[in-house]
Amino acid sequence: MTHDELQAAVDRLRAEADRWVRAVGLVGSTAEALRADGHAVELEGCGDALVLRLPLAGLSQFRPVAGAAAVETAKPEIPAGGSSTAPGQAPAARHVQPDFPPGGAVDPAAGASEGQEGAAEKADKAPAAPRPRAPRSRGRPGDWTDEELQTAVGILSRGGTQAEVAEAVPHRSRKSVSVKCAKLRKWIAENGMEGAAEAPPASEPAPIPATVPRAAPPRPAARPSSLGGEGGAPRAPLSARQVEAHLDALGHAAPWTPEADLALAYALVRGDGLSLAAERLGVAREEARDRWNALCPIKGLDEQQALIAALRRRATEAA
């Protein structure tokens, strides 16, 4: 086996491992989001499967009561000495057995016999019990993460569209993406970021939510320009040489190494979150945030993919 063939086999194994790491990370993120929404979620390993268990204790009020009688058209109540129902009045739908007043002339034995003989016919004619309507999916619960907001700001600040933002954050609903893009466009315009899109109508609330990333002030001009293009001007796709030149200029000040840079980029791209990534690397959250902004000043999808490829090459060479 040649060196190139061995390298290709290693790359395939690494890609397969990365795919499983992302899958497990997404399951963990889903569990954390459900816990944040008040659900008692459990992750269990069952044989060769990872199971996300969501107890249905909160849905007990929607479950049918065991042994409850089926709904059917009941016989009208017959008061003592009175008539059955008014002419033209339809019999009321209620649960069996109906309660008859003491003066009613009803034979219990006859009722039991009738129930045994006509049970199947009545069950066919009985209206179906209403089922609770399943709740609609509202997208991923909770506030937007810093990484999602930075991605959206990067796309909108260079003139990207709402559709591009929706593609970059697939776990968010269309309504959530629409509302957030309107607020972020206003925030971008107010902070004088280059290439800001048109501000939303004046009816939009003025204050930006607290979830807007703190690390999103106008970036120094040198960093974006080192990767080509500024503001909303069209840019050609980044070449490997451009990304390598940017990383060479950035360097590796302690505690950062090629392996640590790759681990940080992997964690943020797959959605682990800045706090968890910083904890795994043993650095402060602010250090991890600043390093990520330095590595990837333009948060577009093409830029992140080119950065990951370059960091993977460097980590392999340093190993």
Image: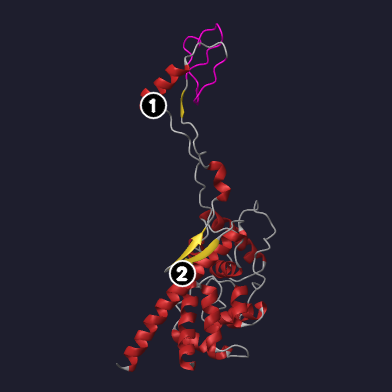
State yes or no: residue 99 in magenta.
yes
Residue under pointer 1: 119
Determine which of the numbered discs, if any, sits on residue 191 in the image. none
Which x, y percent locates residue 152?
A: 56, 66
Q: Secondary structure beneath disc 1?
A: helix
Which is nearer the N-term, disc 1 or disc 2? 2
In 3D space, how far apart are the residues under numbered discs 1 and 2 (Cα atoms)?
52 Å
Image depth: mark 1 or mark 2 in front: 1
Tell me if residue 2 comes above or below residue 77 in the rendering: below
Colour logic: secondary structure
Q: Label 1 is placed on what type of residue?
A: Ala
Image position of 11 (left or right of 86) = left
Image position of 88 (left or right of 190) = left
Q: Is residue 159 visible?
A: no
Tell me if residue 22 comes above or below residue 56 in the rendering: below
Residue under pointer 2: 23
Magenta residues span 75-101
Front in this rendered view, residue 227 or 90: 90
State the residue at coordinates (51%, 59%): 53
Front in this rendered view, residue 217 or 93: 93
